[in-house]
């Protein structure tokens, strides 16, 4: 037992405790000798003979920039400070809620202060202290409630005098354009709490006997920073109740456990990280070069890493003969839903165990048959004397999952110890840690589910309903698949579990931004999340007749445990000449776009669309017309039909030199139709009543004729699923009466929400004839915004 302190010492400072602060006692002697009016809640702690636990204190490798108020210089402070150790305290008196003991561990720091003045002059000061051991006093005591109705609290105290090991040697380097100097001085452990102007206490737990606390504060980082230059520090500790001389083995995750998510090596350097060996299990990070993308498998690399520490909690003299870790890992095919592009990827462990730093440990993988766990890694230290050991776990898959446990053999009596999982932020007890932090029935990191407002949602959920579309929920991707994500144009991206995702591959040959403009029009109108994959990120359809269901699949790397419900497909958007003109006929304007499905005239979800072809013949059209054409065809890929079918003809309007007007499908005309009434649609002016007009100029016009109501030209005039390239319309569906449409009809820029038009197709619009120009959309057509269907698991029928 350490000698008692005569000074109250360093009290833990935390601003987030909440309860009103009682006045600090005059001395710790007064605290532990005074009579305590302990209520029924803290009375239970009198049975605790000892506490054992751990403490971490870290600047969370931080970098912040400030402006010096006097010189206006820009100051950047970058600090990485780490303190990690174990606590063991024994009860001083069975009648008092007061324990005393030790806090020992390691500390290190590296701090840089860079100052750049307005004239360009700069200085850089670096303070560096390598890992150094310390052993100091510690106390815990319960504070009486003042007034009694207030919640009971406790304090964790360090001695103001830390002893000869309280100062750690450090090196100071000063650099400027003029000189570089170096000197040695000392750094005081735990100097953060010493600066606290007052003390704040931790609330006692409402149940159980574990004590713990955690806080993140902005604090000064001397000697690097001035008083007004603060960076974030995180402090956490836990204390477990023990019998005298009892020893427990504890398994701890790294500080980032609650936010850590797996990854695979990425082609994006911002997504690749390589972890530096930890101090006591605390992870640091540094960027490493990216792996080059290739369509063929490459030797597996490593993605995100995290660390786990097993340590003995109890009297300082107890050691372990060896410490063993066991890691169970998944083997989900590939690295993400669509990467790498290999129809039969070799099995690769999604999680692998590695030694952490210089920690001696032998790691052995073996096959495992435990549900979706396929590999067991066993890591064991060689026989020796150990207080703690740690390992690194690295991921190789964006959807990796596993679990880890630890055990040890006591050195003194050979008894086995099974590790108890302890986290700094919760008192929940377990024997294994799930990787990543997740629910027992889920393979998805809790942090991602929470961020997506999907906490508690099953992994196989596919019920997103934005956009509403035709009322069928989902986009063919389960929640786990959305989480695992995709390789998209060389970068990993995750899906949106609240909105429907749609996948597209754009071929070569489009000019300028025409493809992007059309895709944006489709995306904005539908409300779908549009992903564009590169040519190496999916299996292509051979041609427009290829409807093989194993091609164009975007989740071909099958998710485990029923977490893939359907093979979801992408759409290929390509440049191809689809205009076919029968020999011998005069070439008229070809529509130039086509969506290929197995049965002509039927649509469906992306599974039923082999390809969307856009003819280069259409590129001479106005840019907004080209964009409309592309958006129109993409609409067909999500089950949006035309406003009607048929009722369109391409022919010639002939103004004869004898004053008559007629129509013919060919020139010279064969079996022409003599017209009886021609009206200009814009003005209502009748220009022909069936009688010959003398002096008429002989002219032949190429026209696209709307022959009846409820066809492709009908319905909402602003909808891009409506055909707009029309120059003539039958009056009252007459074979001999025509509107001539000289002002082009509007190019659609949205999706309609009803069958009816709003302008010349409005049912009440009778001018200039006795009916609207093209009328309302056909039955079960129009209202395009409510036709959208993406999910390949939903069957479709002709509408």
Image: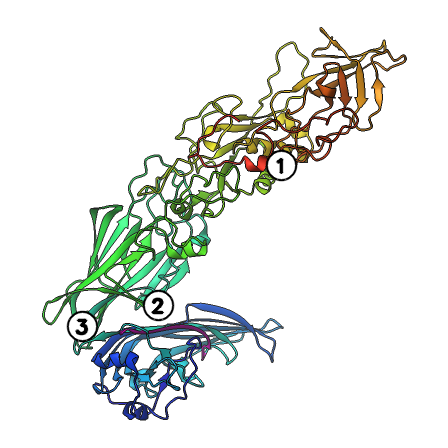
In the rendered image of this protein, does residue 253 appear above or below residue 713?
below
Q: Is residue 766 left or right of residue 604?
A: right
How many residues crowd mark 2 within 10 Å: few (<14), some (14–19), many (20+)?
some
In the rendered image of this protein, does residue 739 appear above or below residue 669?
below
Q: Is residue 500 left or right of residue 349?
A: right
For the residues carrying marks 2 and 1, which lies nearer the camera in this image? 1
Estimate the x, y position of residue 588 in percent, counting from the top left: 68, 18
* Residue, disc 1: 752
- Residue 323 in sight in this render: no
Q: Mark 2 and 1 residues: CB-CB less than 8 Å, in contact? A: no
Q: Which residue lies most toward the left here?
A: 413
The residue sitting at 40% across, 55% down in the picture is: 455
* Residue, disc 3: 247
Region rendered in magenta: 209-223
For the residues carrying marks 3 and 1, which lies nearer the camera in this image? 1
Q: Which residue lies most toward the top here?
A: 671
How many residues crowd mark 1 within 10 Å: few (<14), some (14–19), many (20+)?
many
* Residue, disc 2: 425
Look at the magenta stretch and give its main secondary structure. strand
Residue 472 versus residue 670: which sits nearer the camera?
472
Q: CA distance from mark 3 to mark 1?
A: 71 Å
């Amino acid at each position: 037992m350490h000698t008692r302190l005569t000074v109250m010492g360093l009290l833990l400072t935390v601003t987030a405790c909440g309860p009103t602060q009682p006045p600090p006692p005059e001395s710790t002697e007064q605290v532990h000798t005074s009579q305590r009016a302990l209520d029924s809640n803290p009375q239970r702690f009198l049975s605790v003979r000892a506490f054992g636990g751990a403490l971490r204190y870290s600047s969370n490798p931080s970098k912040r920039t400030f402006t010096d108020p006097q010189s206006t210089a820009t100051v950047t402070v970058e600090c990485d400070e780490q303190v990690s150790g174990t606590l063991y305290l024994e009860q001083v008196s069975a009648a008092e809620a007061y324990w005393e003991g030790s806090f020992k561990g390691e500390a290190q720091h590296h701090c840089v202060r860079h100052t750049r003045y307005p004239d360009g002059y700069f200085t850089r000061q670096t303070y560096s202290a390598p890992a150094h051991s310390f052993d100091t006093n510690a106390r815990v005591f319960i504070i009486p409630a003042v007034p009694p109705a207030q919640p009971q609290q406790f304090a964790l105290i360090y001695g103001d005098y830390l002893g000869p090991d309280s100062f750690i040697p450090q090196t100071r380097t000063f650099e400027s354009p003029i000189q570089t100097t170096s000197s040695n001085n000392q750094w005081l452990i735990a100097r953060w709490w010493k600066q606290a102007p007052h003390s704040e206490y931790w609330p006692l737990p409402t149940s159980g006997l574990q004590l713990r606390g955690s806080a993140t504060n902005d604090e000064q980082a001397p000697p690097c920073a001035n008083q007004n230059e603060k960076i974030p520090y995180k402090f956490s500790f836990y204390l477990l109740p023990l019998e005298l001389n009892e020893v427990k083995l504890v398994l701890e995750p790294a500080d980032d456990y609650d936010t850590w998510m797996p990854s695979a090596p990425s082609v994006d350097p911002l997504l690749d990280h390589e972890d530096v060996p930890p101090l006591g299990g605390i992870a640091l990070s540094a960027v490493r070069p990216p792996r080059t993308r290739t369509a063929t498998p490459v030797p597996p690399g490593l993605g995100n890493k995290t660390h786990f520490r097993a340590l003995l909690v109890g009297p300082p003299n107890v050691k372990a003969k060896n410490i063993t870790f066991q890691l169970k890992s998944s083997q989900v095919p590939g690295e993400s839903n669509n990467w790498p592009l290999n129809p039969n990827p070799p099995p690769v462990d999604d999680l692998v165990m590695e030694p952490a730093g210089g920690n001696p440990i032998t790691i052995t993988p073996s096959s495992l048959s435990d549900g979706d766990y396929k590999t067991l890694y066993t890591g064991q230290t060689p026989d020796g004397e150990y207080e703690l050991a740690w390992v690194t776990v690295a991921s190789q898959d964006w959807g990796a999952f596993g679990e880890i446990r630890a055990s040890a053999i006591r050195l003194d009596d050979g008894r086995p110890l099974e590790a108890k999982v302890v986290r700094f932020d919760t008192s929940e007890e377990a024997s294994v840690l799930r990787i990543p932090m997740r629910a027992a029935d889920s393979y998805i990191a809790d942090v991602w589910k929470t961020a997506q407002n999907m906490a508690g949602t099953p992994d196989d959920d596919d019920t997103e309903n934005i956009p509403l579309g035709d009322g069928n929920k989902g986009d063919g991707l389960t929640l786990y698949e959305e989480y695992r994500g995709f390789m998209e144009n060389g970068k990993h991206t995750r899906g949106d579990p609240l909105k429907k995702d749609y996948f597209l591959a754009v071929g070569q040959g489009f000019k300028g931004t025409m493809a992007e403009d059309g895709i944006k029009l489709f995306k904005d109108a539908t409300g779908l999340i549009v992903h564009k994959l590169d040519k190496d990120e999916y299996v292509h359809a051979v041609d427009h007749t290829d409807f093989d269901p194993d091609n164009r699949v975007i989740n071909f790397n099958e998710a485990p445990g029923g977490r893939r419900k359907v093979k979801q497909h992408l759409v290929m958007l390509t440049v191809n000449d689809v205009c076919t003109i029968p020999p011998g006929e005069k070439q008229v304007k070809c529509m130039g776009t086509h969506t290929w499905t197995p049965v002509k005239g039927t649509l469906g979800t992306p599974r039923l669309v082999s390809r969307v072809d856009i003819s280069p013949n259409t590129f001479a059209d106005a840019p907004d017309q080209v964009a409309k054409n592309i958006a129109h065809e993409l609409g067909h890929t999500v089950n949006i039909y035309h406003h009607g079918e048929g009722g369109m003809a391409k022919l010639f309007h002939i103004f004869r030199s004898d004053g008559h007007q007629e129509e013919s499908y060919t020139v010279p005309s064969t079996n022409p139709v003599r017209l009886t009434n021609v009206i200009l649609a814009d003005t209502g002016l009748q220009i022909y009543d069936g009688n010959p007009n003398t002096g008429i100029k002989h002219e032949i016009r190429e026209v696209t004729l709307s022959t009846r109501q409820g066809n492709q030209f009908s319905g909402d005039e602003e909808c891009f699923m409506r055909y707009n390239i029309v120059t003539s319309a039958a009056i009252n569906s007459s074979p001999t009466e025509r509107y001539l449409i000289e002002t082009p009809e509007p190019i659609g820029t949205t999706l309609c929400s009803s069958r009816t038009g709003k302008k010349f197709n409005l049912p009440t619009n009778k001018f200039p004839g006795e009916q609207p120009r093209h009328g309302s959309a056909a039955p079960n057509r129009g209202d395009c915004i409510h036709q959208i269907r993406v999910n390949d698991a939903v069957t479709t029928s002709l509408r």
